[in-house]
Amino acid sequence: MNEPRPANEPRLILYELAGSDPQLRFSPHCWKIRMALAHKGLQADRRPWRFTDKEAIAFSGQGLVPVLIDGAHVVSDSWRIALHLEERFANSPALFGAPQAAAVTRFVNSWADTALLPAVSRLILLDIYNVLDQKDRDYFRATREQRFGKTLEQVVQDQQVHLERLRHTLTPLRHLLGGQAYLGGKQPNYADYCVFGMFMWARCTSAIEFLAADDTIYAWRERLLDLFDGLARQAPHHKANPELPNA
């Protein structure tokens, strides 16, 4: 969706999901775009948004983040934002590696959203609730309990079972990374960020460690944490904040 915005506003504005600490930005989809912006060498005015702040992004015609304002254009949905960035800033490093690679990357994005996200959520759902602003908690509990058909506490029971299922879900990723440094090959691209966003979602909200230190995915995650001068590693997260509750 493209809508005009006032000309005196900053050129790039990104609305991101935040916890009770406005600096804690944990949405996996917003992290995809944080990494994409850094990949492109772009800066944005990053604005905190919470689940119940629907009016704050009503101009986008929908109620979810990320939302990017680029001059006179408003783009929502992480995939559409990535496509917009690739087209709009074609002279900066390519997000997909090559134009025809966008279709394959879209498959990776869909796998992350439909297979990896549900597997991770069953481990961290209650942790997410605990880092939310008080005004968001009732909304989050009601919507997620309706989605799962059980309480948050029931969803995250049997964590060892959920952990084993997640590790099984990660098998294709583990197999690929056994032969190359990144999903993009020798260098990371948007396919890496689609998956990495899910790991940042967990890192920002939960103390649970999903990966063994000798896992090839662990080494890949470490490399991505260090990208762009440690952008992701330095971001506020659960383990860096002793005031946040333990899992």
Image (tube, rainbow, N blue to C red):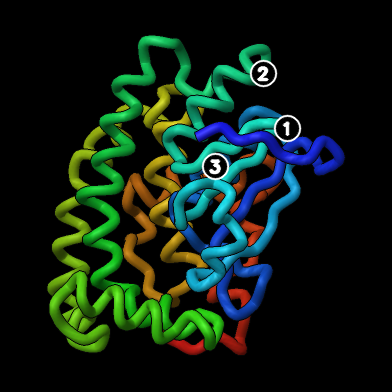
> Which of the 4 image quadrants contains residue 243?
bottom right
Q: Residue at x 60, y 53 (%)?
A: 232
**Label 2 sits on what residue type?**
Ser
The x, y position of residue 34, in whole percent, is 59, 45
The residue labelled by disc 2 is 92
The x, y position of residue 241, in whole percent, is 62, 80
Q: Is residue 246 left or right of residue 100?
A: right
Element under label 2?
A: loop
Task: Name the front one of labels 3 and 1.
Answer: 1
Regarding residue 38, the answer to whether it shows in the image is no
Above or below, 108 relative to 165 = above
Q: Residue at x 77, y 36 (%)?
A: 11
**Label 2 crowding class (10 Å Cα cut-off): few <14, some 14-19, many 20+?**
some
Question: Which mark sits nearer the N-terminus, 1 or 2?
Answer: 1
Q: Are marks 3 and 1 in contact (CB under 8 Å)?
A: no
Q: Are marks 3 and 2 in contact (CB under 8 Å)?
A: no
Above or below, 219 relative to 104 = below
> Which of the 4 image quadrants contains residue 88?
top right
Q: Is residue 60 left or right of residue 185?
A: right
The residue labelled by disc 3 is 33
**Label 3 sits on what residue type?**
Ile
